Amino acid sequence: MPGYLRKWAGTLLVVAPTLTMAFAAGNPPSSSAHSGNSANNKCETSTLGPAGVKMHRGLQTRTSYVIVEEFAHDPSAFTQGLVYEEDGTFLEGTGLYGKSKLRRVDASTGEVLVSHDLSADSFGEGIVAVDDKIIQLTWKERKALVYGRQNLTLLNDFKYETVTGEGWGIATDGERLIVSDGSANLFFWDKDTYKEIPESRLLVQDGHGNAVKHLNELEWAHGYVWANVWLTDDIVQIDPASGKVVAFHDFSALFPHHLRVSLDQVLNGIAFDAENDIFYLTGKWFPKYFKVKICLPEAAV
């Protein structure tokens, strides 16, 4: 999403407390000093100590993770969606009018391998790969673009409706498409017809029962929906049966705020490598991708 609510910056864009993984205050984590053991990507017991958990909106906010690796990300990319492919590439969707793209990126180097430009009147949003296709939402155009998964060739498009009339994030649990629109709602679509499944819509709520708005980029992992929250560096972990947030995950230390040049430079991009239990994270105009092992309590996996 574009950052047109700049007046909120003083209340929303706040640097979080230092992580328990020896991240130095004010210094970005580097792969040499603060990464985990790339041989096994395992979380050490020390990263799960009580100092790594704080409370926010009636729920635990976790800051326990291991940075396995970090590598270059195109700093001109206004990232709106990220998908990890089994061949070791990313699919990445970017936004802004006249600059929106869908592209395939080498997941080990950040090199752009293939790129498709959207029309100048389309603002690209979240993406998902399902079967042999890629679906890319648009912001206010109420239109989704459908591509061939292998060559990123545009095949067709379809219209959709949401509460806000916008498209923000999209993911899949393998059976359904899961969509966000910037509100506190999650929508579930049939993955073949692209129609909303009757009586499936969820209101996402925090530990106090309050709506969690501005749900943005989405990913499916460990049986939960993971969502970036716009204008923050939080990722919420959502129970897809109830809509309840089970935890907030704070990633503000990945790219410290004093190094950012725009209020729009926020975390937005979650990809999950299920085989290796690894997350890839980036953001709008971020200079890096972060390969991350999130340290979850057994009950939250």
Image (spheres, helix red, strand yellow):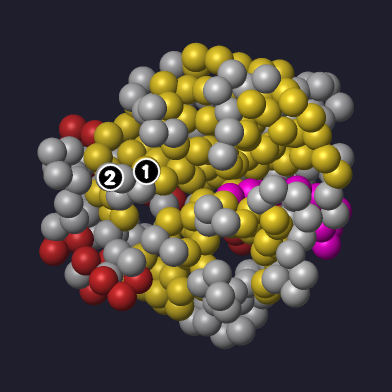
- The answer to whether residue 164 is magenta is yes
Q: Nearer the viewer, residue 297 or 133?
A: 133
Residue identifier under label 1: 273
Inspect the image, locate mark 1, and give the three-letter code of the amino acid beneath it: Asp
The residue shown at (50%, 14%) is 113
Where residue 209 appears, x then y in whole percent?
A: 61, 84
Where residue 164 appears, x then y in whole percent?
A: 83, 58
Q: Are marks 1 and 2 in contact (CB under 8 Å)?
A: yes
Residue identifier under label 2: 276
The correct choice, above or below, for 276 with respect to 101 in the image is below
Q: Main secondary structure of the magenta part?
A: loop
Range of magenta residues: 162-171
Q: Nearer the viewer, residue 279 or 195?
A: 195
Per the image, label 2 sits on a secondary structure element best described as loop
- Quadrant of the drawing holding the N terminus: top right
Per the image, label 1 sits on a secondary structure element best described as strand
Inspect the image, locate mark 2, and give the three-letter code of the amino acid beneath it: Asn
- Disc 1 residue crowd, few under 14, some 14–19, many 20+, Cα 10 Å: some
Q: CA distance from mark 1 to mark 2?
A: 6 Å
The residue shown at (49%, 55%) is 220
Q: Which of the numbered marks, if any, corresponds to residue 91?
A: none
The residue shown at (56%, 39%) is 131
The residue shown at (62%, 34%) is 133
The correct choice, above or below, for 222 with respect to 138 in the image is below
Q: Quadrant of residue 266?
A: top right
| Residue located farthest toward the bottom when viewing the structure as drawn | 208
